Image (cartoon, coloured by chain):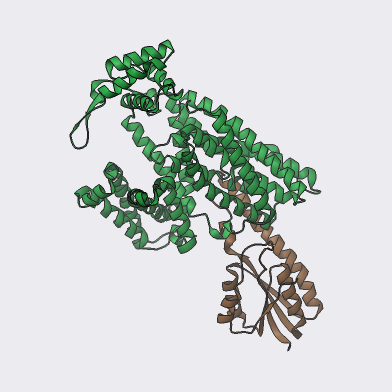
Chain colours: A brown, B green
Amino acid sequence: MPAFAHILLASHDTPGARAAERTALEHCSAGGRISHLIVVPDLWRGMMGDDWLNNAATRDAYGKYVENQLQREIQSHIDRLRPAVLARGFAYEFKVLLGKPAECLLAHSRELAPALVVIGAPRPRGLLGLRSRMHPERLVAALTAPLLVIPYPR
Amino acid sequence: MVYTQRTPWTLIMGVIMVAYAYLVQSGALAGVIKYLGTDRLTGEMLTLGYTFGGIAVLIGLWQLVAKTAEGHIDYYLSTIGGVTFIMLIAFIVKWGLDPQMAQWGRAAQPALGFNFASVMNLNYVVMGIVAGIVIVNVFKVPGWAENGVRLSRLGLKTGVILLGALYSFAELQQLGKLSVVLIGVFVLGSVGLVLWWGARRNLPNSMTGVLSAGVGVCGVSAAVAAAPVVQAKSTEIAYTIGTILLFGVICMFLFPIVGKALGMGYITFGAWAGTGILNSAQVAGAALAFQPTGIETLKVAEIFNITRVLFLPIIVIWLAIWYVKREVGAKKVDVGQVLISKFPVFVLGFIILFLLSSTGIFAPARHYQGAYFDNSDKVMVKKDRSGKEVNNHLKDPDLQLLQKEGEKVKRDDQKAALQRLIENKKLMSIEDDDTLRGVVNAKILSKEGNAVLAKAHRAVRHTAAKIAMFRDLIAWFFTFGLVGLGMQITMASIRQAGGQPLVIGGIVGLIKAVGSLIVVMLLVHETI
C-alpha cells in the first residue's frame, strides 16, 4: 500500500479507533501530516434528559462537569496519540467537533482535502460503547478522498 | 448575545390560535365540536385561544419588525415562540386528537373486543408527551422554539406550587407520612441494592454511584445531581441516563394500564406511581394518564415526588461519603453546601401556597378539596345544557334496593344514616355522607347497592367554580410542562442504555415497581 502525505484520522479512543490510529501511522509518508479529528457526538445535547427537579445551579454544575469530563477524556486521548505521531517524524494537529460523526468528518474533510481518510470499522454488535455510529456508506458516497476502514480488532 | 430569532412562525401560530378561538365563538365549528363531544371545553378554547394567540400575534409582529437588542427583555421575549409552539401542540392534542382517539377506540371496540384508547390510556397527556418525543426525534425542535421549550420545567414547578393550595391539613399529614415511609424504604433500599450489586459485579464506584442515585431517587434529576459528586465518566453518565429514560418512558405507559387492570383508586395508584416509577417527570405523566379529567391522582403522586426530591440532598451526601471512602484522592464534600445547593426551592412555594390556602384567603376552606357538601334543592334539581330538568334525588328503584339490602348493615350509625337517606331520597349531612362512604369502602352492600350510594354521594358533593378553574389551570401547567419535557427526551440518549447498568438498573427498577405495587395493594387504603 502506498504512503500518503496527509492523512485525516477520525478516532475517539475506542479499540476500533486505536486500530485505525496504528494503520494511519504505518501509512503516512516521511515528513507527512496526520490530522486527528475527534467528534463529540451530539447525543450529549440530550444528556440532561427530562430533568426538571433540579435548580439552575445544579444543572449548571452538571453541564460544566460533563463538559470538563469530556474535555479530560479527549485530552488524555490526544496526550496518548500525539507523542506516537511526533516520534515518527510526522506533523500532528487535532480538531474537536460536536455533531454527528459522519457529518463532521465530511465537513472537516472538505476543509482539509487530505490524501487519505482513515476510520475504524463500526463496533461489532454486542460490544459495549456509546451508540453513535460512523456510517461508512454515507462517507463512501460523499468523500472526495480515498477512505480506509480498518477492521475491528478481534 | 441576542436570543430572539427573526421568524414568522410565532405570528403564524398566534393567528391560527386566534382564528380557532374566533371560529369556536362564532359557532362555525359547532358541528366539529358536537362530533368530537368537546362542548364542555369551549370556555377554555376561547380563553386560551385568544390569550395565547393574542400574545403570540403581538410578540410575533414585534419580532419581525423591531430591532432586537441584548438584555433580559430580549431573552424573556425569545421564549414566547417555544411556549406558543408547545401550547399549539397541546391544543391540537387536547381538543382534537384526544376526543377523536376516544371515538376511534369506541368504534373499534366491537372488532377488537376492547376499547384500545381507554385500555392504553391514549388521552391528551400521553399523546402530548408522545407528540413532544416525536417532534424532537423526527423533526427537531426549531431553533426559535428552544428557549421556550426549556421553560417547560418552570411550567411543571409552577404546577406543583399551585397544587399546594388544594391539600387539606389531614391530607398532607397522612400522604406525607405514607410517602416518607414508602419512599424511605424503596429509595434507600434501591440505592443500597445497586451499590451492593455494583460492588459484587466489580463495576467502577463512579458507575455504581451515579446509577444508584438515578435508579433509587428520582431518575435523571438524581443522576444529574450525583454525577459530579461521584466523578462519573462520560460513558457512565450516558448509560445511566439512557437506562432511566428507557425505563421511565415504558413505565409511563405501563403503570396506568396495570393500575386500571387491577382496579386501583386514585390514592393507591398515585402512591404506587410516585414510588415505583424511576423518573420523576414520568410520575406526573402516569398520574395524569391514569386520571386525565381530574387531579386527585396527581395530588397524591406529587406528594411522593416532593418527598423524593427532599430525599435527594441526603442521598447525594450519602453517595459522596461512600465514594470518598472508596476512592483514593476523591475530594471531600462540604455537607452544608450540598444541602443548600441541592435544596428544591420550589417546594417552599408549595408549602407557602398550602399555608395561604389554609387561611381561607382564596376560597372557603371546605371548597379546596373540591367536593364540598350541599344538598339544597337548588343543586339537587338542576337544568342541563339543553334546558331539561335533572332531578338528582334517588329514584324509587334505588330506594327499594337500599331498603332490601339494608339488613346487611349492622352498625347502628350506618343503619341510621341509611334510613335517613331512604326517607329523604338524598343525603342529609356531611356526617351521613362520611358514614355511608364507609359502607361503600367496606363493600357491605352489593355492587348495585354501592352504586346507588355513590350516586347519592355525587349528588351532594360539588366543586366550587373557582376551584374547578384553578384545577384546570394546574392541569394546563402540567400539560405544558410534560409536552415540553417530551421534547427533551431524545432517542439518541435512550439508545445509550446498555451493558451492566441496563441489567442492574432494569432489575432493581423492576423490583422497585413490583415491590411497591405489592406494598401499596396490601397496606394503602383508598381513603384519606
Q: Residue furthest top?
A: B412
Residue B506 horizontal/vertical position (percent) = 63, 49
Q: Residue furthest left?
A: B387
Q: Nearer the viewer, residue B201 or B169?
A: B201
Q: Residue furthest bottom?
A: A2
The answer to whether B481 appears left or right of A33 in the picture is left
Q: Nearer the viewer, residue B175 or A154?
A: A154
In the image, what residue occupies the spot 48% across and 35% down?
B264
Residue B115 horizontal/vertical position (percent) = 39, 47
- In the rendered image, the quadrant that contains the C terminus of chain A is bottom right
In the image, what residue occupies the spot 74% across and 88% down?
A1
In the image, what residue occupies the spot 76% across and 67% down?
A79
Q: Quadrant of residue B380 in the image?
A: top left
Q: Is residue B1 above or below residue B184?
A: below
Q: Nearer the viewer, residue B262 or B406?
A: B406
Residue B394 appears in the picture as rendered? no
Residue B140 appears in the picture as rendered? yes
Residue A25 horizontal/vertical position (percent) = 76, 79
The answer to whether B263 appears left or right of B8 in the picture is right
Q: Is residue B37 above or below residue B426?
A: below
Q: Is residue B275 above or below residue A69?
A: above
Residue B455 horizontal/vertical position (percent) = 33, 27
In the image, what residue occupies the spot 56% across and 57% down?
A46
Report how many numbered discs are placed on residues in the image: 0
Q: Quadrant of residue A109 in the image?
A: bottom right
